[in-house]
Image (spheres, coloured by chain):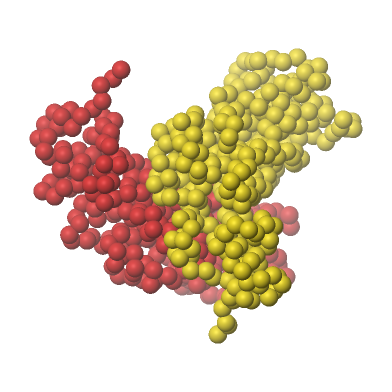
Chain colours: A yellow, B red
Amino acid sequence: MQRKSTIYDIAAKLNVSVATVSRALNDKPNISAKTKKLVLKTAAEMHYEQNLLAVALKSGRSQNVGVIVPRIDSYFFSTVIKGIEEALNPYHYNVIICQTYRDKNTELTKIEALLNSQVDAIFISTSNDNEAAYERVLEKNVPLIFFDRTTDIETASSVTINDFEGGYQATKHLINSGCKKIAHFSGDQNIPIFRERFLGYRKALDDFAIDYNENLVIKTRSSLEEGKNAVKNLISQNILPDAIFSAIDYAALGAIQELQEGGYKIPEEISVIGFSNEPFTKFMELSITTINQFPLEMGKMAAQIFLEQLDSADAKIIKKVVLNPELILRKTTKEISVIDK
Amino acid sequence: MQRKSTIYDIAAKLNVSVATVSRALNDKPNISAKTKKLVLKTAAEMHYEQNLLAVALKSGRSQNVGVIVPRIDSYFFSTVIKGIEEALNPYHYNVIICQTYRDKNTELTKIEALLNSQVDAIFISTSNDNEAAYERVLEKNVPLIFFDRTTDIETASSVTINDFEGGYQATKHLINSGCKKIAHFSGDQNIPIFRERFLGYRKALDDFAIDYNENLVIKTRSSLEEGKNAVKNLISQNILPDAIFSAIDYAALGAIQELQEGGYKIPEEISVIGFSNEPFTKFMELSITTINQFPLEMGKMAAQIFLEQLDSADAKIIKKVVLNPELILRKTTKEISVIDK
């Protein structure tokens, strides 16, 4: 049987003192954040096992963190969660997940339940305005990190993507590939991420001197059906566009199915771009051009902010990280004949 | 402002005594399970709000239940969880979710974390053998309900589907539609659900007097890549079949993509059936024939077993529910010319 690793082994490997290793493992002061991280990483690599219960009792920490998302059955959210877990695993944090179905009261209940469970941090993607509850979490000194869908609270950290830029990139690509009449399936404009995508769309139209036509903007929710209905809507108004930028992948797929049933050629007659890079956008025979939101990186970054806050208990670090999205070109858009400027 | 509902309103509406309503809401004895459920349902409909914290303090319950799954980024598991939440919402239970990535130690950690959080029940889909931990949960009188992937412990309740029957139905359908050389992509045979699907496949071959050929059985994991490789494998051996029954939807899709790249016609030359009814199987232009495992019903059923156990604290009810799967016919299989027997 293999001998278990001890703190002596870790000290020897890193050429530091046993006291240093102990300080790192037991979360004591007088050690640099850099050294501490190195020790924890090495301990994880050497499969060093602390008595976790003893650690929790000593430190007053549960080693549990909570993640609250609107829904888990989405590639985006489940991948952010995976990113958080991957980043926190070496530090023996246990992630528990709650979903709100976007309901404001459910979100409140989940926050309370996590606080009652003594979690060490809460990661949340909100579509509600439970500001009072968020403030309460922060007052309790429980780190609260927002991702994707954030709040206006100044003192809360967040990791978001630049949705405006995503909307801009998508629309600009359609224009550069020769499209002139570009519809937008917009999502709920009360939710900031969708408002930003819409504003990016508008800005691109402006920059390329294309008139904005509000009849071409249709509010859709995340379903195939709503994408289909939006296309029917445009056809019935006799204003079928030469391109659709959908802020939602599912609505983009619904649009594509409806257009194909109507005999329209994609992308020759109509180009389509989605948003989120849901796995099916890649799987389809006619794979769908979409926007990568880097969910794994988002989760890792959110976890990193939490770890930094732990390192500096006195001076709480507030970070607002904004990731840049990336356009993924696939088969539902035309190639660009002129150079992308 | 609307007046809040009181227990007097509930009693009046149901024509029962206030004492009865109180017994139901506070989980006291001397009330039938039927009446109790009716009261709780009516209370929920009338938006009656108890002081939950007071209830928890009185009853020693946290009103939290935990769900442990291998991964959340699967239609099947996220839908089971939705079923559990829908069934428990009227009873003010709060669901917290953990994923194990199928790792045995991670599963142990999650069970401990949930017990430490004082959950009132644990729902688990396991692919590990943490029997000692399961026994510990049961000894603590915390209801433990298995779903999909279960254990051999006699005293644990479970809701599963008849995977054998699913494998049998899929294979029988292929035979009835004229296929004679049927490959099987089998999944990890150490996991009971995959072993059962394989046994169903074998039984159907036997029943229709088709010789079993072990070269046609290829172990695949849940990825497109493994499905593609399995097809390459068959081609390289020069034993391309006229049908594939894949125990995994993702491997089925990979196989279809590889076959299409090779110029094979589906279903004319080769039929393909998957398993699980992942959303993409429906979305594809060439929609994929697959097996419905009724995940929403499975979740609701599991929640129901928990509620029944609550109702009868003295005589603990053990239930082993087995759901029957359903074959969903789509475009990757041929129509049956003879009558299905």
* Residue A288 seen: no
Q: Quadrant of the C terminus of chain B?
A: bottom left
Q: Position of residue B152 (x, y in %)?
A: 36, 71
Q: Position of residue B32 (x, y in %)?
A: 14, 47
Residue farthest to the bottom, as pictured? A1
Residue farthest to the front, as pictured? A30
Asked if B225 appears above or below A84 in the picture, the reply is below
Q: Position of residue B254 (x, y in %)?
A: 65, 57
Between B336 and B312, the one nearer to me in the picture: B312
The answer to which image quadrant residue B67 occupies is bottom left
Asked if A260 appears above or below A10 in the picture, the reply is above
* Residue A218 seen: yes
Between B73 and B234, the one nearer to me in the picture: B73
Between B254 and A155, the one nearer to me in the picture: A155
Between B43 and B290, the one nearer to me in the picture: B43
Q: Name the residue at 60% across, 57% down.
A: A29
Q: Name the residue at 53% across, 75% down.
A: B211
Q: Is residue B50 left or right of residue A224?
A: left
Q: Position of residue B277 (x, y in %)?
A: 51, 51
How many numbered dots are placed on residues in this image?
Answer: 0
Asked if B334 appears above or below B135 in the picture, the reply is above
Q: Is residue B184 left or right of residue B109?
A: right
Residue farthest to the right, as pictured? A339
Q: Quadrant of the N terminus of chain B?
A: top left
The answer to which image quadrant residue B184 occupies is bottom right
Q: Name the residue at 55% across, 85% down.
A: A1
Q: Name the residue at 64% across, 76% down.
A: A9
Q: Is residue B5 left or right of residue B80?
A: left
